[in-house]
Image (tube, coloured by chain):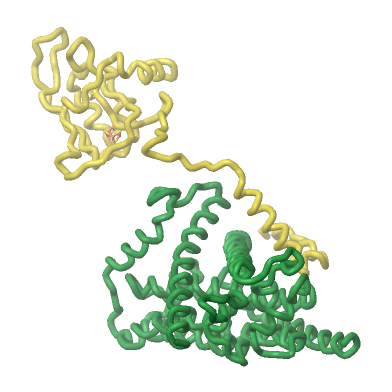
Amino acid sequence: MTRPLPPIVHRKDLTFWQKLYIPEIVRGLKITITQMFRPKFTRQYPEERWVPGAAFRGRPVLVEESGVERCVACGLCSRVCPALAIEVQASESPYWKERYPVKFEINMLRCIFCGFCEEVCPEEAIIMSKEFELTFHSQEDAIFPKEKLLKSKEEMKERLDYLRANR
Amino acid sequence: METLIDIVKIVTVMGILLGVVAYVVLLERRVAAAIQNRIGPNRVGWQGLLQPLADVVKLVMKEDIVPRNAHRFLHDLAPIISISIAMTTFAVIPFGDSITLFGRTIKLQIADINIGVLYILAMTSLGVYGVTLSGWSSNSKYSLLGGLRSSAQMLSYEISMGLAVIGVIMIAGSLRLDRIVEMQSGWMWNIVLQPIGFITFTVAAFAETNRHPFDLPEAEPELVGGYHTEYSGLKFGLFFLAEYSNMVVASALITTLFLGGWQIPYAAEMGLSGNLLSVLQVGAFCAKVLLLVLFFIIVRWTIPRFRYDQLMSLGWKVMLPLAILNILATGLAILLIG
Ligand code: SF4
Ligand code: SF4
C-alpha cells in the first residue's frame, strides 16, 4: 500500500517591491506604531482586582448551615482527591446528622483546584470558592483547618445556585 | 585652563551620556510594552522614572559568578573593554557649534581631531574585542559561538559602513566631523544628497551595535544569552550599558553624518544667534538622536531576526555592492555638477 504523496505547495515568488524589503519594513513599522496607541490590556493588579464569575474554581471551602458544617465526614472527598490534600476524621455528632468531622484539613500547597471534591460530595458540603490569592509564609500556614475552611451558606449562594443550575 | 575646560566637558558629557543610556533602557521597556499593548514598568517613582536606579541597585547586589576554568583576567577585562570603547567613541562627536562663556569661546565637542571619521571607525572595530574576548574567556560553548558570530558579523558590516561614509567624506572634502556638520547647513543634509549611503550606513549601524534584526551574537533561542551567558551582576550590567551606549553613539553618529548634526534649518533667517542659538542647536542634536534611538527601539519590536546565512549574504551581496555603487555615483555627480 502506498501512501498518498503530500500535496505540493506552490509558493508565490516575492514581487520586486517585496524583495526590496524596505517598503515591507515601513509597512511593519506602521503596524507596530499604530499598536502603540491602542488600549492596553494590563490590569493594575493590587488596585484593580478581578472578580471571577460563579464558574471559577478557587480554593475549596466547607459550607456552613445554621452554625454547623454540612459535612457528614463520609470521606469521599478525601478518597477522590488526586493530590491527597484532604484529611477527614469522623466522629459522632449530637446534631440531626449522625456524623461530623472532628478534623477537616486541606493542605493548600497540595490542592490543584480540580474540583473533584466538590463533584463527589453527596451533601454539597465542600464547594469551590472565588478566592485565588493564596500566599503562605510557612508550610504549616498552608494547611487550612476547619475553622479557616468554613463559609456560610449565604456567602456561597452564587456558587451553590450555579451548581444546581448546571448539574 | 584649557585642560580644566576639557575635564569639565568630559565629565559633563560622560555624566549626561550615562544618564541618557540608563533612561534609554527604561524607554525601550516602555515602548516595547506599548507595542505589545502592555503598560511596562510604572511602579518605581512617577511613571517608573526611578526604575533605572532600582535596576542598578539590583545588578550591584547580585553575586558575581565566574565559571570554572574561565580565564579570570579576560573574563573581567571584556566588559570593561566594551563599555570604555562605547563611551570613548562619543569623544569626537560635535554636539553643538560653540558657546561663549566669560569671554572664552568653547567648542561643543570634546576632542576636535582632524581624522574624526577614521577615529570612529577604528573605535567601533575595537568594540568587537569586548564581545569576542567575553565569548572566549567564559569557557562555554554558547558564549564562544556568540563571540564568533559577533566578530564575523562586525567584520562584514564594518566594510559597508566604512564605504558608506566615503560618499559623505567626498562631499565634505574633509574627515573632520565638525566640517561635515557645517557642510549640511539649511536643508542640504546628507540624507538628501546621499540616500543610499544613509540606508547602508543605518543598516550597518544596526549590525555593528548588535541590535535587532541583527542581534545574532545574543540570539536567545539558539545561544541562551550569547556572549554574556556566563556573566552576572555588575559585569553583566556593564555589557548591558555598553549595548545601549553603543546604540546612543550610533544614533549620534548617524545624526552627525547624515541628519545635519546640530544644524537647525533656517536658524539664521529666524534671527537667532549667539549663545541662545548654540543651546538650541544642542537641543536639536539631542532631539534628533532621541528620535533615532526611538527608531532603533521600534525596529527591534517590528522585524524578526535574520538567519545567519541571510545576514552574511545581505552584508556581502547587497550592502557592499550598494556602498561601492554609491561611491561611484557620488564621484560622477561631483565631477559633473561640481
Ligand atoms: S480541589 Fe481537587 S485537589 Fe483540591 S482538595 Fe478538592 S479534590 Fe483535592
Ligand atoms: S465528601 Fe462532603 S460530606 Fe463527605 S467528607 Fe467530604 S465534604 Fe464531608
In-front residue for pair B259/B267: B267
Q: Position of residue B135 (x, y in %)?
A: 42, 82
Horizontal side, residue B7 vs residue B334: left or right? left
Q: Is residue A17 above or below residue A80?
A: below
Image quadrant where one finds the N terminus of chain B: bottom left
Quadrant in the rendering for residue A141? top left
Q: Residue at x 25, y 21 (%)?
A: A151
Residue A135 image point, x, y percent: 26, 41
Chain B image colour: green
Nearer-the-camera pick, B281 or B255? B281
Position of the C terminus of chain B by quadrant: bottom right
Q: Answer left or right for B338 relative to B222.
A: right
Q: Pinpoint residue A9: horizontal percent, then vertical percent.
A: 74, 60
Is residue B300 in view from this perspective? no
- Vertical position of residue B115 compared to residue A28: above or below: below
The furthest residue to the front:
B103
* Vertical relation: A91 (above or below) B7: above
Most distant residue in the top direction: A96
- What is the x, y in percent for residue B193? 79, 77
Q: Is residue A103 left or right of residue B83?
A: left
B329 and A35: which is toward the camera: B329
- Chain coloured yellow: which letter? A
Q: Is residue A77 above or below residue B321?
A: above
Residue at horizontal 38%, vertical 51%? Answer: B44
Residue depicted at x 82% and y 89%? B331
Please tell me which residue lies in front, B55 or B333: B333
Can the viewer see residue A25 in this picture? yes
Report the number of numbered marks.
0
Q: Looking at the image, in which quadrant does ligand 1 appear? A: top left
